[in-house]
Amino acid sequence: MKIGIVGLGLMGGSLGLALKKISKKYNLLGFDHNPTHTKDALRLKLVDTISTDFKEIKACDVIILTVPVDAIISISQTLTDIASTCTVIDFGSSKEKISNAIPENIRTNFVTSHPMTGTEKFGPTAAIEGLYDEKTMVICDVEKSNDYQKGVALSIFKDINAKIVFMDAKEHDRHAAFISHMPHAVSFALAKSVMGQEDPKSILALAGGGFKSMSRIAKSSPNMWEDIFRQNKENLLQSLELFNKELTRCQEFVEKEQWEELHDWMAEANKLHDIL
């Protein structure tokens, strides 16, 4: 089976590493607009070969789009002439706009997915083995995919040892706003507030594990997250509004020295770890 991986960064590169472990089953063709990425992908053996002609990607049995969400929509518009047996899988972090933007004549070729995994790093050198191992792979609007394409996607996801969850795209985007998108916004804001008040030497000297954990994802790609925030704007704004209300409650407890109320508020938050 020939698989074209479009986008050779963290997600695409790590996917290549996972699939190359089953070398007899898959032949991997990589595509990326960044020539440095293609050179690194070959050097790191993330794919078998590189293509500079997108027609070769369109001729693959499977096309996997691991590019920013706006690019997924743009690329989908160019795939209207793919074979009826071609399977297209996208790994976008927002799903409803992608699902609805796919051209009608190839909508059944698509399996819209979101792997709930990643790191703050990007580019081919960020690729790591086992990124998808035992991680949740959300498949959205599966009823819009042909049974054949669904079967191909499920087989690939099984081979990379992902855990499958089916979900409506609209529902996915609401949950993702609270669990993924809003935390990234908070991390960016935390980094900005500290950078505006503290000199770099103080940050290096005093930043402990808590700060490093909370600010880690502020290192994520601005290009990627700008697109995600734009596509999931309404859900993100709702999640940020609710977060700001809780932060304001904390501020008021401290201002009014309502320590018992603050303690109870923290204790309620502790219950999250009973779920996780």
Image (spheres, helix red, strand yellow):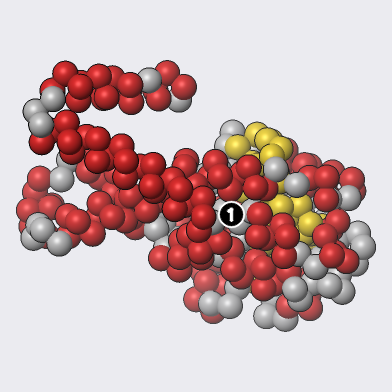
The reply to whether residue 115 is in sight is no
User: Can you say which quadrant of the picture contains the C terminus?
Assistant: top left
Please tell me which residue lies in front, 135 or 19: 135
**Rendered location of residue 199, percent (x, y):** 8, 60
Quarter location, residue 107: bottom right
**Rendered location of residue 128, percent (x, y):** 50, 50
Pointer 1: residues within 10 angstroms few (<14), some, or many (20+)? Answer: many
The amino acid beneath tag 1 is: Ser
Taking the spot 18% from the left edge, 38% from the top edge, the residue there is 251
Q: Is residue 194 above or below residue 157?
A: below
Residue linked to disc 1: 94
**Residue furthest right as drawn:** 84
Q: Locate residue 162 relative to residue 88 in the image: left or right.
A: left
* Tag 1 secondary structure: loop
User: Can you say which quadrant of the picture contains the N terminus?
Assistant: bottom right
**Rendered location of residue 119, percent (x, y):** 44, 50
